[in-house]
Amino acid sequence: YENNFLHNVDFHAATGALGGGALTLVRPGEKVTIRWKAIKPGVFVYHCAPGGAMVPWHVVKGMNGAVMVLPREGLKDRNGSPISYDRAYYIGEQDFYVPKDPSTGRYKEYLQPGDGYSDILKVMKTLTPSHVVFNGSMGSLEGENALTAKVGESVMFVHAQSNRDTRPHLIGGHGDFVWPNGSFNDPPRTNLETWLVPGGAAAASIYTFRQPGNYVYLNHNLIEAFILGAKAEVKVEGKWNDDLMKQILAPTKINGNDGN
């Protein structure tokens, strides 16, 4: 399929020229190269922004991502002590607006990327997504594709949402260190259960896993997580620590004379 649209890239990490958008606008069959200096350490969204209604249209079609700019001296906590991590995962949260066929109740399918523009625009104007997913599709980071870690490892999660607010949460864990608005120039917040990432931003968090098992990393709008798809699995290997959690009584039938 030959592209018929204008495209560009707006780097939120860049300075000037609409984040590079004014210098990267290309027509079908064209290419462009720019150079920009990363002077702001942090995690930042980038997205296509060719102008007008095509900006949200391209963003909700998945034309977005994130850039991480690490400080030369490394990450620091509020006391200036170094922060390290063993692995990093990117969570690209995406809202889609897929129309349904009123006669069948099923989602419509279109042959070409530009087809269905007016139908999709109607759904977009409701501000109610049909899907909210991680990394492109429902279940993309679950089952065989689940994220992995080991007890004792520190894992960074870079979470980006180019269009809507989101609320990352790790079920069974926390944000040991969190940069909710993405700026590594600012000291991280600590020990958070859930943090807000505004639409058009990226955030970074680090957690050191202390127990093995299956964790769920999700958008804590639980409707968007469990019904629309904004969740991932983290499978953690290692030895269980009874000091942190232990089952004292297995599920048993309640006796009416227990008084509990």
Image: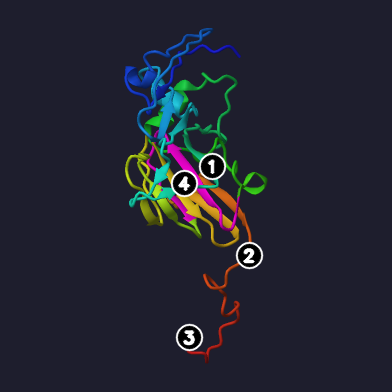
Q: Nearer the viewer, mark 2 or mark 4?
A: 2
Whether pointer 2 and pointer 4 mark residues with C-beta atoms closer than 8 Å, the reply is no
The residue at 38%/39% (across/down) is 182
Q: Residue at x 49, y 46 (%)?
A: 156
Which residues are drawn in magenta?
Answer: 149-170
> Quick check: can you spot residue 226?
no
Disc nearer the start of the sequence (3/2): 2
User: Which element is circle 2 on?
Assistant: loop
First in residue order: circle 1 vs circle 2: 1
Give residue 89's mark: 1
Instruction: Give the residue type at disc 3.
Output: Asn
Please report whichever mark, 1 or 4, sits nearer to the chain's N-terminal start. Answer: 1
Question: Is residue 59 or residue 257 the one in the foreground?
Answer: 59
Left or right, 89 with respect to 75, comes to right
Please state which of the two labelled residues, at mark 3 or mark 2, is closer to the viewer: 2
Q: Are marks 4 and 3 in contact (CB under 8 Å)?
A: no
Q: Quick check: can you spot residue 83?
A: yes
Among the two numbered marks 2 and 4 on one chain, the one whose residue lies closer to the N terminus: 4
Nearer the observer, disc 3 or disc 1? Answer: 1
Q: Which residue is mark 2?
A: 239
Which mark, by number, is residue 260?
Answer: 3
Q: Secondary structure at mark 1?
A: strand
Q: Residues within 10 Å of mark 4 (few under 14, many from 20)?
A: many
Cα separation between marks 1 and 4: 21 Å
Instruction: Report if residue 154 lies within the magenta region.
Output: yes
In 3D space, how far apart are the residues under numbered discs 1 and 2 (Cα atoms)? 23 Å
Identify residue for label 4.
Answer: 224
Q: At numbered mark 4, what does the secondary structure look like: helix, strand or loop?
A: helix
* Kind of residue sitting beneath label 1: Tyr
For the residues labelled 2 and 4, the Cα–Cα distance comes to 33 Å
